[in-house]
Image (cartoon, rainbow, N blue to C red):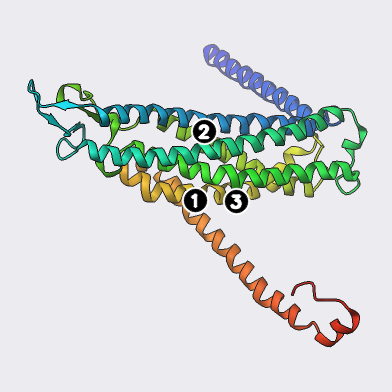
Amino acid sequence: MCLFTCIGKCIGLTFKCLGKSCMAMCRALCKCFCNPVSPGAGFFIQIFLYALFQGFNIGTDVGIFFETTKMYSKCNALATTIIYIGNTTNVTDHIYCFNSLSNVTQGHLMDQIQTLQILQGVFFFFICLSGGIYVVHIAVLFPNACRHWRDENFENMLAEAPAYYQKILQIHTLFLLLESVIHDMPMSSLAIEMCAQMWGIGGVNCWECAASMDLLPAVDQSLPGCEKWLGLLLGSIALVSIYKGILPLYAWIGNPFCWACYPLRICVVLPAGFLYCVLTLAPSMGVALNRLFVVEPSMKKEMGTFADTIWTFGLFFYGIFAIIALLYWLLCGKCICSMCCECKKKEDGKGCLCC
């Protein structure tokens, strides 16, 4: 009996200590989330986190570009190498690949190289364009956030804030939208298409091809380093897209520079962030379903369900937006224009705004 009593007391004390520890952690979290920081800090922290994630985004673009450049050099060397038959001086253009050991020539490889070179050029153009926009974006926002770090006007509500601060938020939102159109959508789609080319469109894969059977890799190497960079790119684009979808509603329902109330407001507007993320990634998931998974079926096992879901919901919401825009133009635009009287317009010397 004494032993069972001691065991019961030990268990009771253990749960009591755990309960107190959990309560202390909850109080610490509540204190952290409910106490405001210095004026302007909320806006500055938000800009800093965005700059960090978007910079990482650009960095993954550069990583994919260098990975494909290494791939291009290997392919070009293999496609231009003079291949001799055995120990003779006879020349052949036949090469050996891990998954297709016959009927592969240097001409097939050269076709893949030319396509990859075009994709690389377009990808590099978008890297420079989106990188320039990112630098301008940060150069505009950071000095203003630092200059007015202790300005009490940061603590005002959005409707009461001076026009200067409203302009900062508007410029930030416009840059976010521009970066989605210039960077997120095209770069994610291009990266997936480039990886599809690297992993062997038409069964030709430079990572698994060689001039002779002896030089072939011992194991299947169909998933090179591009897989790592592609995962990082899509993950970072998803995180930044959620932030972009959250920001407008987050600012609209309250003070955009308030740190104390942000957990509740984030929970309220989080669905908008996920919706924006789906709309941003939908084009790239379409490329993955129709190009990448055909070339590399193992990738379908890893992200097939995710890609199907994003692509389906993306098409659904894009269709809804298209129908709404069409109905608005047909029902509102034409009806309003038809209500304008030509005689009255001539007499007043005014035209109809929508015509």
What amino acid is found at the position of numbered circle 2 in the picture? Asp
Q: Which residue is mark 3?
A: 275
Q: Quadrant of the C terminus?
A: bottom right
Position of 42 with respect to 189 (left or right) is: right
Along the line of sight, the residue nearer the viewer: 119 or 194: 119
Q: Are marks 3 and 2 in contact (CB under 8 Å)?
A: no
Which numbered mark, 1 or 3, is in the foreground of this view?
1
Residue 313 position in % (x across, y down):
51, 55
Q: Which residue is mark 1?
A: 283
Q: Residue at x 45, y 45 (%)?
A: 306
Q: Secondary structure at mark 1?
A: helix
Q: Which residue is mark 2?
A: 61
| Residue 46 figure quarter | top right
Q: Residue at x 29, y 38 (%)?
A: 110
Q: Are marks 1 and 3 in contact (CB under 8 Å)?
A: no
Give the alpha-carbon distance from disc 1 to disc 2, as whole Å. 17 Å
Q: Residue at x 78, y 46 (%)?
A: 170
Position of 331 with respect to 164 (left or right) is: left
Q: Residue at x 91, y 37 (%)?
A: 153
Give the alpha-carbon distance from disc 3 to disc 2, as whole Å. 24 Å
User: Compared to 232, does 271 lie above or below?
Assistant: below
Q: Dot 1, crowdedness within 10 Å: few (<14), some or many (≥20)?
A: some
| Residue 48 figure quarter | top right
What amino acid is found at the position of numbered circle 3 in the picture? Leu
Which numbered mark, 3 or 2, is in the foreground of this view?
2
Q: Dot 3, crowdedness within 10 Å: few (<14), some or many (≥20)?
A: some
Give the alpha-carbon distance from disc 1 to disc 3, as whole Å. 14 Å
